[in-house]
Amino acid sequence: MARSLPQSLAFAAAALGVWGSALAQNCLVPGKWFAAEAGAHQVKANDVLAQMAQRQVVLLGETHDDADHHAWQLATLGALQLLRPRMVIGFEAFPRRVQPVLDKWIAGDLSERQLLEQTDWEKVWGWPADLYLPLFRFARINRIPIRALNVDQALIKAISAKGWQAVPESQKEGVTRPAAPSPTYLDDLFNVYKLHPESDGPDKGRQSLSFLHFVDSQTTWDRAMAQGLAEAARASGDAGQPLVVGIMGSGHIRHGRGVAHQLRDLGIESIGMLLPVAASRDCAGLTGIANAVFAVPSLPASASPPPRLGVRIEQTKDGVGIVEVVKGSLAETTGLRAGDRIVSIAGTGIARMSEVIRAVRAQPPGTWLPMRIRRDGLEIDLVVKFPLER
């Protein structure tokens, strides 16, 4: 599955006990940390974590459906919490309106099922809850407050359609005007925008209203999360200010162009950025991507990544709807369109987003997956033909 991506630096390698000079292209060693400010240099985990524990805010990236990324986040949270016990954890996965539910969870008043139901997990986020539950359990067991960082998707959609100025203040959930994005972030966002169906047409370039509204929506997303983190970082008590850790998609973190940029605009300067990256990745391009990266072991050549259909879906009162089809994706090839509602997959009725995700991820390479969708009042049968493993 593919969601819209929107999408984050000051680490002296010498201060972290770096050994050796710049390494070769495939220089990452699985299970090791690397400073990423000037090339990729291996650093000691204790040094990385000690430096990060002194920051006001630390951002931990992820690919939402990668179990290894979430395992790394959990280990990193545990290590940081040992160094600085007073902590607040903010999650992109939760919209602001569910904050009272998160407070009940930390207090021990809700079961896991109640937490997911009352936060509208299936409707709001939809990625497999099993990937995130260990993080939520860690917070509850240690009585670490959880902060809901996101806003409702209805706001992001409205801004994407009409622009920031056209949306009434009463509908902005308290989000203040985002700082203008840097030219490099505009480049990033335009590359993402080109994958959207609305980027087609002769007047859909970088100066089009469509793209400018898209930029407004993505920077609003960054701003909302930055505000939640900044507010938590400024809270003080008898134990002093907490270490605030943000759990979010890596696209919001890379190169400090997203959430970190908005944090600096809000007066938060002491920011740490840590990302998990595949150990097979070339070191070229890692410079400045974060303060440090952790090399996650790559899948063996015989293993295939989970299949991806190439759609963004949402939970509706009528079931699961397709919001967006990525250009060039398997979904587009199959004939799926934005606005379709998924009725069944392989003959089994579909009511929840997680059912779609599980069905697609379980599909072996080279097989066909029947799907029934409802479009304009008619039910249509389509077959998703997964390519053979390469």
Image (cartoon, helix red, strand yellow):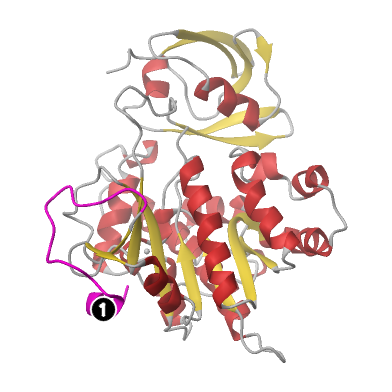
Residue at the image position 67 percent from the left and 12 percent from the top: 348
Compare residues 106 and 386 and report the one nearer the observer: 106
Residue 33 percent location from the top left of the image: 33, 60
Q: Secondary structure at mark 1?
A: loop
Q: Is residue 75 left or right of residue 269?
A: right
Residue 131 percent location from the top left of the image: 59, 42
Quadrant where the C terminus is found in the figure: top left
Compare residues 178 and 297 and report the one nearer the observer: 297
Q: Is residue 190 magenta?
A: no
Q: Three-letter amino acid code at disc 1?
A: Ala
Residue 349 percent location from the top left of the image: 69, 15
Compare residues 240 and 325 and report the one nearer the observer: 240
Q: Is residue 2 above or below residue 98?
A: above
Compare residues 32 and 110 and report the one nearer the observer: 32
Residue at the image position 24 percent from the left and 70 percent from the top: 37
Q: Is residue 9 left or right of residue 317?
A: left
Q: Is residue 78 above or below residue 120?
A: below
Q: Is residue 279 above or below residue 227?
A: above
User: Is most of the magenta stretch helix, strand or loop?
Assistant: loop
Residue at the image position 59 percent from the left and 19 percent from the top: 376
Q: Is residue 7 visible?
A: no
Quarter of the image holding residue 43? bottom left
Quarter of the image holding residue 150? bottom right
Q: Which residue is mark 1?
A: 12
Residue at the image position 47 percent from the left and 66 percent from the top: 59
Q: Is residue 140 visible?
A: yes
Residue 90 percent location from the top left of the image: 60, 65
Q: Is residue 30 magenta?
A: yes
**Residues in magenta?**
9-31
Q: Neighbour class for label 1 at 10 Å: few (<14), some, many (≥20)?
A: some
